[in-house]
Image (spheres, helix red, strand yellow):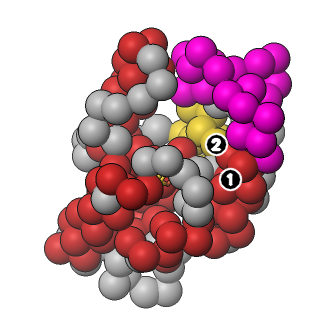
Amino acid sequence: MRPLRLRGHHLLCVHGFRGMGYSPSFVEKMKEIVRDIRDEEKEMLIQVVVALDEACFSCPHHGESTCQADPTSNDHVVSMDKKVLTHLGLEENAVYLKSELLRLTAKKVRPDDLDDLCANCSWLSYGVCKEGIANLRQKKSELSEIASSPFQKVWYDKKI
Ligand code: SF4
């Protein structure tokens, strides 16, 4: 199973995505990714990166290896990626099970954490991202997935 490459901050974006985006092709790609991630029946591998990912390559603003939306955009998205990885305790470039990443996100990210993790993102003020995280936490707590203790170590295999 080839892992989906997802940059750190997109681990949060997928929960609030409501069809808005930078271009029709980007929106289509995000819809595809979000559909897979929200599909409870579907397990998949996700490689967590601090770099352009599969969504970025469908965005009109991507360069060869960096975001070129404006002179500061790459530094901004990279800093969000790193903050999210640190917050979740994930290792850059490692591969994880989607189900474990969702559990970890539900357990460790509170809606108001986005004020720091996503500072200066233009989508933050819409409120849909905080709502998406709140919904994820609600769903996982109803399934008693957050409460399961101790939290299982996230599986990964760097060789993939
Ligand atoms: S505020 Fe921006 S970076 Fe944060 S989850 Fe929403 S779209 Fe993603």
Which residue matches tag 2?
7
Q: Where is residue 137 in the image (x, y as percent from the top left)?
A: 30, 70
* Residue 81 marker: 1
CB-based contact (under 8 Å), mark 1 and mark 2: yes
18 and 70: which one is in front? Answer: 70
Does the magenta-highlighted stretch encompass residue 106? no
Q: Tell me the magenta residue range.
A: 55-75
Q: Where is residue 146 in the image (x, y as percent from the top left)?
A: 35, 77
Q: Which amino acid does label 2 sit on?
A: Arg
Amino acid on which disc 1 is placed: Asp
Residue 158 placement: quadrant: top right
Q: Position of residue 148 (x, y in %)?
A: 37, 82
Is 91 rendered above or below residue 151?
A: above
Does the rendering let one see residue 97? no
| Mark closer to the chain start, 1 or 2 | 2
Label 1: which secondary element:
helix
Say left or right for 136 vs 121: left
Q: Does the residue labelled 1 lie within 8 Å of ligand 1?
A: no
Numbered badge on residue 92: none
